[in-house]
Amino acid sequence: LEDQCWAFIENEDLFSEDTAFLLYLDAKKIGNTAVMELMIPRIMKFFLMLVSTKDFLELSVEELCLLLRSDYICVN
């Protein structure tokens, strides 16, 4: 089952950047920092849409800094 889950997550056609952020939020709720850290690099072009959401406003300072330090976010 775990292998199937990872295969799904690794498939960019099925598992998009916004889905990665939703998984980040779900992992945050249960304190699964390993999954949270794995999802940050998956947020790239979605970052610009993310900053206009309520979820973005609810991020902690630490989470915001983690996102902004990511080498993967795309900002025009």
Image: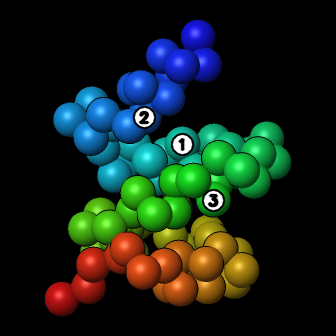
Q: Position of residue 41 (x, y in %)?
A: 45, 63
For marks 3 and 1 on the same chain, the one whose residue lies earlier in the sequence: 1
Q: Which residue is mark 2?
A: 9
The residue mark sitting in front, 3 or 1, is 3
Q: Position of residue 50 (x, y in %)?
A: 37, 67
Name which residue type carries label 2: Ile
For label 1, the residue is: 23
The amino acid type found where label 1 is placed reads Leu
The residue that label 3 is drawn on is 37
Q: Would you say the residues marked 1 and 2 are in contact, meaning their CB atoms lie under 8 Å apart?
A: yes
Classed neighbour count for the residue bearing mark 3: other residues with Cα under 10 Å, few (<14), some (14–19), many (≥20): some
Q: Residue at x 61, y 78 (%)?
A: 66
Regarding residue 52, the answer to whether it shows in the image is no
Relative to 19, does residue 51 appear above or below in the rendering?
below
Mark 1 vs 2, N-terminal side: 2
Q: Amino acid at mark 3?
A: Glu
Q: Nearer the viewer, mark 1 or mark 2?
A: 2
Q: Is residue 36 left or right of residue 47?
A: right
Q: CA distance from mark 2 to mark 3?
A: 14 Å
Between the C-alphas of marks 1 and 2, the distance is 10 Å
User: Does the image show residue 36?
Assistant: yes
Q: Residue at x 58, y 11 (%)?
A: 1
- Please tell me how many numbered marks the rendered image carries: 3
